[in-house]
Each structure stands twice: as C-alpha cells, then as structure tokens.
Image: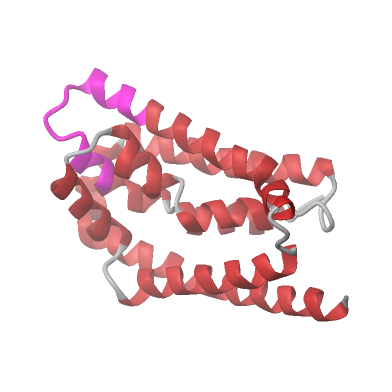
Amino acid sequence: MIDFVATFIFFFAVIDPIGTVPVFIAVTRGYDAAAKRKIAMIASLVAAVLLVFFAIAGELLLTAMGIPLPAFQIAGGIVLFLFALSMIFGESKPDEEVKLVRDHHETAIFPLAVPSIASPGAILACVLLTENARFNLFEQVQTVAMMLAVILLTLLLMLVASSIHKVIGNAGASVISRVMGLILASVAVTNALAGFVSYFDK
C-alpha cells in the first residue's frame, strides 16, 4: 500500500489546483457558464490522459532510450527543485500563467490543461511514483488514482472558480502556490537523494 496522504499532497503540490483557479478565470473571461463548464471538463480530461500516459509509458520510454531510472530520478529531483524555487521566489503559478493567457489568447488546452494542470512537475511525478522496480502494479494503480483525485479536485475548483476567487483573490492564490513550492522543494530533494542512493548501490 502506498502512503495515500503523502502521495495526494505531492500531486497537490505539483498540480496546484488552487493556483489553477486564476488561470481558469482569465482563460474563460467572456464565456457563458455552459462554455466555462465545457472548458473545465476538456482541460481536466486532456491533463488526465497526458499524465496517465506518462505513468504507464514514461519508464518504457526511458528504457528504450537507455536512460537508467536512478539518473532520471536525480534529474527529475533537480528539475522539480528548480520548479519549486520558481514557485517560491519567482512569479507564482497564477501570475505566470495568466500572462500566457494574455499573450497567446489560448483556450482550454494551453495554458489551462498544459502546463497549468499537467505541469512538468506533475509529469515527472507520474514517472517517478510509478517506477516498476519500487512499486508493484497495485501500488501504481493507487498512485494514478491519487493523481486523478487531485485532477478531479482541480475540476471541482474550476467549476466554482468565481466564488473561490472572490474569497482568496490573486494574492491568496499566490501565497498558497508559494507554500506548495516549499513542500515540493522538500520532496524534490528527497527524490534526488534516493536517486543517488539507487545509482551508487548498483
């Protein structure tokens, strides 16, 4: 059995459902309620399919390219750590991705599904937390279920985005994003250290 709480918090940190709310509001500005619901569902579905694909095929792709998983784990930990630093010290996720909306005028797919929900950190997490050598099939299914639960939570938050945004505002979403960045930085260091141990134990 996996640690459900830790796995859920990990995916909550990398996907950052609350940080998605301002992005969703910006990308759906001017749409009616029915269109907003449709965009939220499409974005969630696309993100879920993408992350499930990497959970299933991510390790196979690495093997086909001759990349040992510990090396990917170390690299992934470093990338996740840099991603976390950008959440803590740089522009928060809402601020950065709302700018993408203004610049590119995209809809549900970009930047809402990718990279807001299916972020680089979430993709790395899917690969690292479904490693065949460390987790059996049942545990991998549990991990995917936790990831899908976070996406479902993200969908629910998008559906009530207007009400949430009135309560926390952009500043509140920014604070939460930075706290999630701190948690993610700790997880990233743990993953990188585990990768070093696995690599040098061989």
Main SS type for the magenta part?
helix
Residue name at image x 30 percent, y 65 percent: 92
Near-viewer residue (38 or 70): 70
Please state the horizontal and vertical placement of residue 142, each as a whole percent of the image. 73, 42
Residue name at image x 22 percent, y 62 percent: 171
Magenta residues? Answer: 23-41
Please state the horizontal and vertical placement of residue 15, each as a whole percent of the image. 46, 52
Residue name at image x 65 percent, y 65 percent: 72
Please say whether residue 11 is visible from this viewpoint.
no
Q: Quadrant of the C terminus?
A: bottom right
Determine whether, in the image, residue 62 is placed left or right of residue 197: left
Examine the image and state in which quarter residue 99 appears: bottom left
Q: Residue furthest left?
A: 30
Near-viewer residue (170 or 62): 62
Residue 127, relative to residue 156: is it above or below?
below
Q: Residue furthest top?
A: 34
Please say whether residue 106 is visible from this viewpoint.
yes
Q: How many marks?
A: 0
Please state the horizontal and vertical placement of residue 172, each as a whole percent of the image. 27, 60
Q: Residue furthest front?
A: 65
Is residue 45 covered in magenta?
A: no
Please state the horizontal and vertical placement of residue 91, each as a whole percent of the image. 26, 68
Residue 147, relative to residue 180: is it above or below?
above
Residue name at image x 47 percent, y 39 percent: 153
Determine whether, in the image, residue 162 is placed left or right of residue 181: left
Q: How is the image coloured?
A: secondary structure
Near-viewer residue (9 or 88): 88
